[in-house]
Amino acid sequence: MPEMLRTSPNIIITGTPGVGKTTHCQQLAQNSGLHHLDVNAVVRQHNIGESSNDPDDPNTKIVDEDRLLDCIENDLEEGGQIIDWHACDLFPPSMIDLCCVIRCDNQMLYDRLKQRNYDDKKLQENMDCEIMEVLLQEARDAYDEEMVVELRSESTEDIDSNVQRLESWIKQWRKDHGKEEAADVEAKGGEGKKDEDDPMFLHG
């Protein structure tokens, strides 16, 4: 088996819009020192999303997944990424160490999406996605069973508990892969500029 080059794990945090993905990512990044990789921000920055032909939802972007992976591939190889997006199966299993699917109560999710002013069609599509466990199944189809974990997100206590569990998992991952010392050096060095932060990365 080849040596693991990355000194910190790559973690996907996915789920239906409104379940609390970004809140988890931000808090985990702050506590762990890993980098919050906001895929929506990368898509906007590099203009790699095309407008949908759906007249009912013209603001929806169809993402060019190949260009997206080109943009973030180096960061995934380096490791230490908390990937924040509503899909997971495009990321190669060889570059992913854990996939967390955030879930919440259906009525609570409905209320959250209503507060975001989702129209009826978009709201129903997202509710159907959550009820049918679409993203959970997507994760289970894409990655080994031991790599997928389902986390509830219905209160601040849930989020705090989930983040603590993930911090413990990160520490154990580093220990298991002999990366504790390298991770300490990495943390002291601070974050450098990431490829996805450079708007010219895909055009150079």
Image (cartoon, helix red, strand yellow):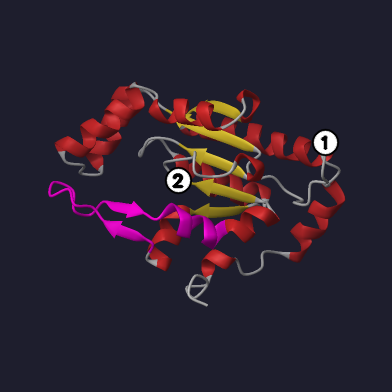
- Report x, y in % for residue 47: 37, 66
Q: Residue at x 28, y 29 (%)?
A: 127
Mark 1: secondary structure: helix
Q: Residues within 10 Å of mark 1 (few under 14, many from 20)?
A: few
Q: In this orientation, does residue 195 appear?
A: yes
Which disc is residue 41 wearing?
Answer: none
* Vertical position of residue 40 compared to residue 112: above or below: below
Q: Is residue 190 left or right of residue 62?
A: right
Q: Is residue 52 left or right of residue 187?
A: left
Of the 4 image quadrants, the one containing the N terminus is top right
Q: Given the image, on which type of amino acid does mark 1 rest?
A: Asp
Instruction: Give the residues drawn in magenta, as a range.
Output: 48-72
- Report x, y in % for residue 161: 59, 30
Is 50 in the magenta? yes
Q: Give 43 or 118, whichever is nearer the viewer.
A: 43
Q: Is residue 71 left or right of residue 191?
A: left
Q: Give 203 or 96, whichever is nearer the viewer.
A: 203
Asked if the residue at tag 1 contacts the one at tag 2, i.e. Cβ–Cβ closer than 8 Å, the answer is no
- Report x, y in % for residue 9: 69, 45
Which disc is residue 176 wearing?
Answer: 1
* Residue that badge 2 annotates: 85
* Vertical position of residue 83 compared to residue 102: above or below: below
Q: Residues within 10 Å of mark 2 (few under 14, many from 20)?
A: some
Mark closest to the chain's N terminus, 2 or 1: 2
How far apart are the alpha carbons under marks 2 and 1? 27 Å
Count of numbered circles on the image? 2
Task: Give the residue at the far left of this rendering.
Answer: 55
* Vertical position of residue 172 compared to residue 2: above or below: above
Displayed quadrant of residue 51:
bottom left
- Report x, y in % for residue 60: 26, 51
